[in-house]
Image (cartoon, rainbow, N blue to C red):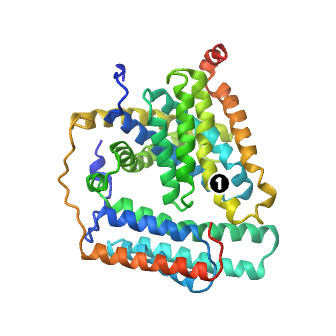
Amino acid sequence: MEKAVKTKEITGWLHLDPRTKLAMLVLFSVVVMIDVVDGPAYAIRVVMTFIPVFLVCLEGRVHIGARFTLLYVFATWLMQFTQKNIHGVAGMLLLFVCYMIMQFAPTIITVWYCISTTKISEFMAAMSRIRVPQGIAISIAVMMRFFPTLGEEYRSIRDAMRMRGISFGRGKVTKMVEYRLIPLLFSTINIGDELSQAAVTRGLGAPVERTNISEIGFHARDFLIVLVMLILTILYVYFTVEGGNVIL
Amino acid sequence: MSKQESGNKLKGRDLINVGIYTAIYFVVVMALAMTGLIPIFLILLSSMIGIIGGIPFMLFLTKVKKPGMVLIMSLIMGILMFVTGMTWMPIPVSILTGIIAELVYRSGDYKSMRSAILTAGVFPLWSCGNYLPLFLQREQYFADRTSYGQEYIDAVVRLTPNWMFFFWMSRRVVWIMCK
């Protein structure tokens, strides 16, 4: 149960307000859902893609930023190469993969950044500050906290299955799903029970207003980032409308 | 978990359950979405979510005793989809389907197996929201698949109870009796 030791949580010296990150996510989703391939809007899109990458690097995770940059550049290159040289089914497949990477990798890295640099208590404080109902806030917080646990459990189960000689590619697909999903489910039930007992002991669900000691608040850097993102998003939308691309 | 808490208000424990099962569900859905890289699986994806995602979801339903939990889970899935770049459409869709699923499960007093199975069939409809933009934006590309929504609904409703038969062997008798 030494999870606290194992989880590598980067708390972030940049210390952005969780609400800033939330705003970033929302603005980013706006950009991702509009699709462009060229023109000034595309340039803005690329710039916006690299803002979270830049932030990740600032937090001292340069290797992740670098890996992402490589992937993105490679996907862009491959897309252009495919469009020119490869046709038929293979070309379509490759284009599709590239498209998926370019579409979703930016959001994935943004989400990763937001989750890994936010402490749960900070998140809760921010949520109650913007008056999100407790039900949703607690559920999301638990969910965020649970992803690493799930990963850990899955790794142990995979090791156990390897010991038993059940590995990928052998046997049926249904068996593979069964041997992994069912143990995962049942171990998570236990963890969940423990978690809820711990939380109830600490007063979750008590009929009083919850207090929170984590300090959150907007600083100059928060305003700066939100402002930059906002301006870029507005420009992006403006250019896409101007360029006659269909929106929704 | 032996004692059932009375009252209809959601307690911390319920919310934690929602969080945990949403996490599992989301991971399963994402793992399935990875197979969506192969185009044929993209078409099958929604029904796959219904079938494989149904495993954790049924387990979740056994923990649901109060109104609102299914709705919250559905809403969170919608928000997650929004965050991962599927446009804003999943959110209203997920709220809508969440309410429907909630009502279906409520009709069985959060106990009946039959309504649980129906709920498991209705709930994955949230994933339809992901595909709405595909239809609205790239109509020419997906012109030959516009009937997909209806087909998908049929598929889930048809396949999920079939799978329930298979997987919840011990409950089969109960289900038939309910029917």
**Residue A79 occupies quadrant:** bottom right
Residue type for callout 1: Thr
Find the residue positioned furthest to the bottom.
A40
Residue B117 appears left or right of A123: right
Q: Position of residue A114 (x, y in %)?
A: 38, 63
Residue B59 appears left or right of B147: left
Q: Quadrant of the C terminus of chain A?
A: bottom right
The subunit carrying tag 1 is B
Q: Nearer the viewer, residue B6 or A188?
A: B6
- The correct choice, above or below, for A89 with respect to A234 in the image is above
Q: Residue drawn at (34%, 44%), measured in percent from left and top?
A: A138
Q: Nearer the viewer, residue B41 or A60?
A: B41
Element class at badge 1? helix
Residue A158 appearing in the image: no
Q: Residue drawn at (72%, 77%), measured in percent from left and top?
A: A82
- The correct choice, above or below, for B173 with respect to B20 in the image is above
Q: Position of residue A16 (x, y in %)?
A: 29, 68
Q: Position of residue A105 (x, y in %)?
A: 53, 67
Q: Residue drawn at (55%, 75%), measured in percent from left and top?
A: A72
The residue tagged 1 is B35
